[in-house]
Amino acid sequence: MEKVNGRKPRLLALAASLAAPLLAAPAQAAPQGEALVNSKCITCHAPAEDGQLARIGDSRRTPEGWDMTVARMIISHGVKLSADERAAVVKHLADTRGLAPQETDGYRYLIERDFNRVESVQGEAKLAFDTCARCHSYGRIALQRRTESDWAKLPHYHVGQYPVIEIQAGGRDRNWWELATTQVPAILGKLYPNDSGAWQQWQQRERASAAGTWRFVGHRPGRGAYEGVATIEADRAGADRYKVKFQFDYADGQRETAEGEAILYTGYEWRASVKQGGMDVRQVFTLSPDGQTLSGRWYENGNDAIGGRLLAARSGNGSAERLLAVEPTHIKAGTTQRVTLYGNGLSGDVNLGDGITVARVVERAAGKVVVEARADGAGKDGVRAAAVGNARLQQGLALYRNVDYVAVEPEQAMAVVGGGKGPLPKVPVQFESVGYAFGPDGKQGTADDIRLGYFPATWSMANANAFAEEMQDTTYAGTLRTDGLFIPGDAGPNPKRRFGTNNAGELVVTATVDDAGRKLSASKHLIVTLQRWNDPPLR
């Protein structure tokens, strides 16, 4: 797209601004957010009788939600803010008009940019889902709180800004305007009100500091389990800003370090930018209300398909005994294998549950205990609780006789072409194979199925249908590595393809697992599609 009068078109400028991550920690002391809101925003948002600024006082959002709003004010309404001023405004708004921890439950996948799932909404919210989620995720709605009157203003704004919504995804198959302006605001005002007991209680809590030493565990798709230690130091007293260092030790023996800066919004929303193993990484975690645990997802900046999950607990003097993870997560009946238990202050006897005997302790430390475990050949399938002394983990070690079936993760597989001569990077998909036991009912796909954990697999891919075969999608759409990582093709027209089309395609990826000589396979449909040019923090 060509520049207009030496400037990028407004749409691309807006997209770039919205896609910019929240600033983790400006080099200089940030201007006071409240003063900036009162001086910059009051021009258009007049104070109401309760002292709140109009519209601003009628809603609450996550840090990403407020940053998107501030970016829109800059692009669409000409508000003049420097990068540090923008960060300060977002910090103030997220702290004073954010969401309580329980108000983000069930929708953190959107904040953490874990997009490998399909949303499904039933019940009272179904009408709002059908009306609004034709253009963006339902999670984007559920991560806001507004008065009913403010929810009612949104349809008018949307029509003014995005008039194509009338025909988006079959919008003309219903009286969408009447629904959007009458029924939907009432539903959203009830489900996601601006005033809530949860927020009032959270505002009254004493905020915890994240500073200290932490013990953590996690899983990185394609690499496996890891554990490590983190040091978090307060950067400026009372500013919710931190210097962080992480050391990752993977189960395969590799080590990775991370170092950077973080900021804590709303008393619990952790956002950090770190250099990790050669990657620029974003951390999106939550600090528990008591300040004892830190958990969430991290991902490569600009390529959120690559990342991992992390759970951390405070360690050191005075920290509670806690068992964080057992690795591996499964043991086959009649076999002996090494099992490692990770945690804090681990001491006392190791108990892996019925049918699993600890033959000997191989290694013991306060943060890690390695044992040789033997599984009874007649043991019943099931997940046992694990314990080291008083530290207990309910979902400990799964004993199984056979892997009854396997499944391929992620839930939704979509890769995006990129690179080549285009400005946007490729978005890959990291596949993993998960083993299951049927459970007591002996049937697949029921509530009592037992998730055993990750199993190594042999990977293959094929064309998904006759048209994909005709278009030779396996040749052009991308490559599948032996570790399950699919890397899509280059962006842009491909003169070698029929019609000179791009490298999009439809594929089927198959994992084959060897369970003591038994071969089990599972497949996942994979769509390889085109670039997403406007990718805001909350889709």
Image (cartoon, rainbow, N blue to C red):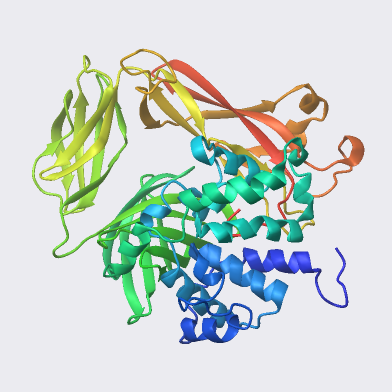
Residue 137 in view: no
Which residue lies at the image location 79% right of the left edge and 51% below the top edge? Answer: 164
In depth, the one of 378 and 85 nearer the eye is 85
User: In the rendering, at what x and y percent does residue 248 appear?
Assistant: 37, 56
**Residue sitting at the far left:** 348
Which residue lies at the image location 82% right of the left edge and 43% below the top edge? Answer: 502
User: In the rendering, at what x and y percent does residue 452 appear?
Assistant: 36, 29
In depth, the one of 436 and 481 nearer the eye is 436
- Above or below for 517 versus 308: above
- Above or below for 26 versus 129: below
The quadrant of the rendering that contains the N terminus is bottom right
In depth, the one of 363 and 416 nearer the eye is 416
- Above or below for 487 versus 243: above
User: In the rendering, at what x and y percent does residue 538 appear?
Assistant: 58, 56
Which residue lies at the image location 46% right of the left edge and 56% below the top edge? Answer: 193
Q: Quadrant of residue 497?
A: top right
> Number of numbered discs present?
0
Residue 290 in view: yes
Give the left or right position of residue 460, taking residue 76 as reference.
left
In depth, the one of 180 and 513 nearer the eye is 180
Which residue lies at the image location 49% right of the left edge and 27% below the top edge? Answer: 407
User: In the rendering, at what x and y percent does residue 180 appear?
Assistant: 65, 48
